[in-house]
Amino acid sequence: MEYVARSFTFIAIYGISYGMVIFLISIGLVVTMGLMRVVNLAHGAFAALGGYLCTYLVTSQSIPFGAAVLAATIAISILSFGLEKTVYARIYKASELDQVLLTIGLMFVTVAGLNFFFGPNVQPSRLAPALEENIDLLGRSVQVYRLFVIAVGAIIVGGLWFLFEKTSFGARLRAAVDNRGMAQAIGIDVASLYSKAFVLGSGLAAFGGAVGYGMLPIEPLYPFKYLTIIMIVVALSGFGNMKSAAVVSIAVGIADTAGRYFFPNYGAFVIYGFLISYLLFRMEGGFRGKSA
């Protein structure tokens, strides 16, 4: 019984913390694909850039972890604003094939650039001393960092819920997701909304990459390595559905953690079994609910 309790504690805490990082990285793509209908396969590159910049500031410049996360998020958000205006705005009305080719090309460029400037190896992930400590929780030694990520993720989920449900920005965003033509007809500046949503999504991805670099190793192939998980969340959530994205991300995190815990040699395949089983029972694709 004690073994079961300890296993449950491990899977719950580590799975939820992993799921929170997945959510932070994926939510931007969930919203922007729902709003813009753009297949942005380079979304993971923003998370990788956020993680790289954060690790560089922490390890090479000795900047405190919190300040480094904030600086990385702001820097990548500014970069994404420039990319949206110069690159992404040109493909909003392009075909899906053109979108895939351009965005996967951007991802290849990012991978090559990271490999050139930082080398092919995994970057060191030094956390704040307080986050590296362990505490006993229900008979299990748990790293404080994992609890920190869960707390931060919960705050972000609450903040996004308030933004999408209780503000005029959220109302306009939901209107544009549901019916872009009608939103434009009633005077909503959809182009400006696109820019803001894109920057928000990219900033959240960078934030997730920065906060989660202690869990998801920072390496040049990062955008490719976690693209599948990101797309699983998008596919199961439904475009533009923030609540479902949070639920699916945590479910994916727990399923993946449980699979690797109980089946160390085959755990990497469990998440795909989870995906296939889910889609077989829910052919409509994901948890249903109102957008955003």
Image (tube, rainbow, N blue to C red):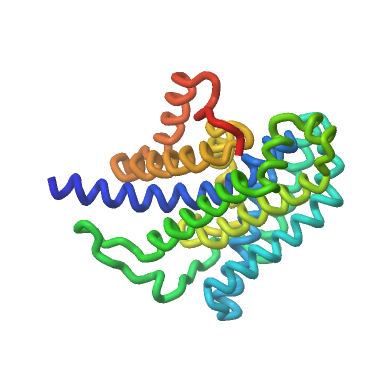
In x, y percent, where is residue 11? 32, 47
Depth check: give the residue in front, 191 or 22: 191
Total number of numbered labels?
0
Q: Residue furthest left?
A: 1
Identify the image quadrant of the C terminus: top right
From the viewer's perspective, is residue 83 above or below residue 71? above
- Residue 187's x, y, as percent? 84, 39
Is residue 164 depicted above or below 79 in this figure? above
Return the residue nearer the eye: 12 or 262: 12
Residue at image coords 76%, 30%:
96
Q: Residue at x 61, y 54 (%)?
A: 204
Residue 15 position within the rendered picture, expressed as x and y whole percent measured from the top left: 38, 48
Res 229 visible: yes
Q: Is residue 224 visible?
A: no
77 relative position to 15: left or right: right
Question: Which picture quadrant has residue 114?
Answer: bottom right
Write the residue at 54% across / 35% down: 232
Quarter holding the N terminus is top left
Depth check, front residue: 78 or 102: 78
Please indicate whether residue 199 sits to the left or right of residue 10 in the image.
right
In the picture, measured across the screen, residue 268 lies left or right of residue 238, that is left
| x then y, percent, for residue 154 | 46, 54
User: In the picture, residue 265 is in which quadrant?
Assistant: top left
What residue appears at the point 57 percent right and 50 percent down from the top-left corner? 162
